[in-house]
Image: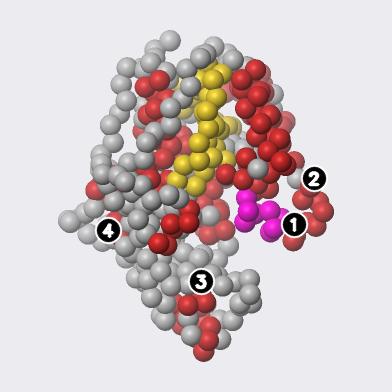
Amino acid sequence: MNTAVPIVVDLFAGAGGMSAGFVAAGFRIAAALESIPVFAATHKANFESCTSISQDITTLTPKEFAVKAGVRRGEVDMIIGGPPCQPFSSIGAPKIKSLAGSRVKKDERKYLVHPFLEYVEYFSPRAVLIENVPQLRTKDGGKLFDAVLAKLSMLGYSVSWSQLNAVHYGVPQARRRLFIAALKGRRAYHFPAATHALETDEVKQLSLSLASQLPPVTVKDALEDLPKIQDGARLDLLPYSKDSALSPYQIAMRGNQAMVGNNVCRVSNDRAKQVFRHMLPGMKYMDLPPKVRKILPFREDIFHDRLKRLHPDRPSWTVLAHIGMDGYMYIHPWENRTLSVREAARIQSFPDSFRFVGNMREQYVQVGNAVPPLLAQTLAEGFFAQLGATKVRQRAQI
């Protein structure tokens, strides 16, 4: 086997945030599995040499997948993926409960990690990476988390885990996620040290402040060169708004692109836009005077941060899939509209060459659900080195 190009299978692949990071680090994504057809279509559009299959993992055995994907046992170096996390999320669980009542206890998505492990057992790759929300550790008394670690150990892996914040790895967003890493044999995976500090009060509660060489990447660093668009835009390829005095992050995201796509932005109603005009950078709904809040009233006991304007000089807060619903928690830092799909993708660290397919809502949800590619790349570089591959691609300092 050519160890210079390790082969990866991506399960629960979504649009391909993890895949993008692993490709950037020098891996080859041979096959991917994603149950939602439009998400799988985005994955296929961006990874043309990969066999992207759209099917529910519970209806496709590992052997059947191997035949469909054209991959064989013994040739897969690594399996990566993020089983659906909604039931574990502190935000998602109350929403599900309010909609489904007691049925939340029967939500089978929290058990989809089990078929993931069946694929690991079948293919026996040299390495495994599982991504999920931090609440996986404590839900159900920690039993599921412990069972995952025990199963991987039983299969002959040395297992380690860590909670990482994407902002510490050059992503302009505070986003905490849990990662479980496994390597065959006795060597444990060593999680990467932080490369960027987090020094802002806005997101201090999400992570420890770290001493580091590089300051956090800000929303302005991420967005300032993107096309100028209006509320309600339905545009694809557009030229950049500027080509000089670019931040290192902008240069890294642009690559050699001359145009950038997915300049799609929802229409905000007139009352919302009136309120936007009163919002200073970093301001949220309850920071507004009562007379302004009456323009667009919400239940103030539960919707105190229903509207939030991003601060240009700080990292963003977490971009969630809920951005596909209304986007009011992601008001543009200096324009009176919500973020476009491309702007949200920039905050998630998707390169500008990455194209999202589907309708506007589907594009937003794909962005919000993804693992930030830059964070995935950092993790992948560690696996690349520890798997004995010959060269790790170096990324620019951002």
Q: Position of residue 61 (x, y in %)?
A: 69, 24
Question: Is 263 on the left-hand or right-hand side of 124?
Answer: left
| Lower position in the chain sequence, tag 2 or tag 4 | 2
Residues at marks 2 and 3 touching, judged by CB atoms closer than 8 Å: no
Dot 2 alpha-carbon crowd within 10 angstroms: few under 14, some 14 to 19, many 20 or more? few
Look at the numbered disc 2 and give the secondary structure of its residue. Answer: helix
Q: Is residue 257 above or below residue 188?
A: below
Magenta: predominant secondary structure element? Answer: helix
Q: Nearer the viewer, mark 2 or mark 4?
A: 2
Of the residues shown, which amino acid type is indicated by label 1?
Lys
| Lower position in the chain sequence, tag 4 or tag 1 | 1
| Lower position in the chain sequence, tag 3 or tag 4 | 4
Q: Which residue is mark 1?
A: 97
Q: Nearer the viewer, residue 347 or 34?
A: 347
Q: Which residue is mark 4?
A: 225
Which residue is outermost to the bottom? 291
Q: Position of residue 132 (x, y in %)?
A: 57, 41
Q: Quadrant of residue 11?
A: top right
Residues at marks 2 and 4 touching, judged by CB atoms closer than 8 Å: no
